[in-house]
Image: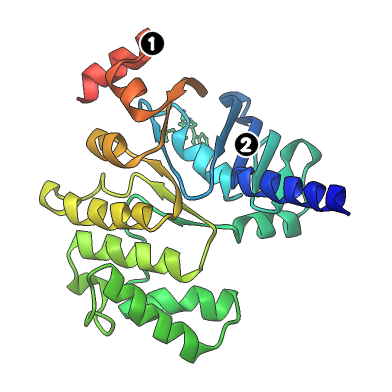
Amino acid sequence: MSEHRDEARAAETAEAEQPLVEVTNLAKAFSGVEVLRDIGFAVPSGSVTVLIGPSGSGKTTVLRCLNALETGDAGTVRIGDVGVDYSAKPAKRSLARLRSQSAMVFQAHNLFPHLTVLRNITEGPIVVQGRPAEEVEAEAHRLLESVGLAGKADQHPYQLSGGQQQRVGIARALALDPQLLLFDEPTSALDPELVGEVLGVMKDLAVQGRTMVVVTHEMRFAQSVSDQVLFMDGGVIVERGEPAAVLTDPREARTRTFLQRVL
Ligand code: ADP
């Protein structure tokens, strides 16, 4: 009896300790040109991983393969209990299941200009997920409040600043109730004075225990908020570790050169 209980407990512990995200041997080429090679990493539940690296190093493609906006040529991606093996050419349905595990916040706000802020947030959950409108709208109001935009529900995107639009983008991603949030340079299209308000919301999400993978050039954010930094160059992960190690005491010459340029 007790042996069984021990086994059950061991299984539970193993499950609890399993990272939310696991990527192995991910590879991708565009028109025969290799842009990702042997990418592997894990993201523990409730942690923040930041991807850094020069332009063209493959950071966005990693994010896009995580949520199947792009299909890898080889390798596996697992988020929660949904995994795909890109080598096995997964069916559309498998890719759709993987996509439903995460939500992406893009570089430039890509809100629908003709819809109100509220509709921008509620469209996905109502139309794609088929959830009841009333419940989704109530949740959208709560999310708007949480990103500091209570009272903006009926405005249109053009009436908001870039930083406010990006915060709507974050609320829209949250409304999908994803296990994983993906951010693709969420502040790089913003005027400098608007960057802080968006990073502030992202920091709040991290503190709340959201699991996040963030592509960013904001090294201070990486330093203070992330649990793990991955430095990419030429389609591979060159160096990885805790932010204090990678950002302040990098082992690799390529990491040092990159950091000297951006810091
Ligand atoms: P990063 O996010 O680090 O700037 P990307 O992942 O956007 O890098 O791009 C990695 C490489 O893949 C670049 O050389 C880029 O030009 C190329 N690439 C990205 N997307 C496509 C695409 N859809 N078609 C062809 N090449 C692409």
In the rendered image, the residue lying farthest to the left is 193
Rate crowding at label 2 as few (under 14), some (14 to 19) or many (20 or more) other CA atoms within 10 Å. Answer: many
Q: Which residue is mark 1?
A: 251
Q: Position of residue 72 (x, y in %)?
A: 65, 38
Q: Quadrant of the C terminus?
A: top left
Q: Earlier in the sequence, mark 2 or mark 1?
A: 2
- Please report the residue visible at 47 percent of the width from the left and 77 percent of the height from the top: 123
Compared across the picture, whether 146 is left or right of 195 comes to right
Q: Is residue 44 visible?
A: yes
What label sits on residue 169 in the rendered view?
none
Rate crowding at label 1 as few (under 14), some (14 to 19) or many (20 or more) other CA atoms within 10 Å. Answer: some
What label sits on residue 23 in the rendered view?
2
Compared across the picture, whether 25 is left or right of 240 comes to right
- Please report the residue visible at 70 percent of the width from the left and 54 percent of the height from the top: 81
Q: Position of residue 170 (x, y in %)?
A: 36, 62
Which one is nearer the viewer's eye here, 147 or 194? Answer: 147
- Please report the residue visible at 67 percent of the width from the left and 47 percent of the height from the top: 13
Q: Amino acid at mark 1?
A: Arg
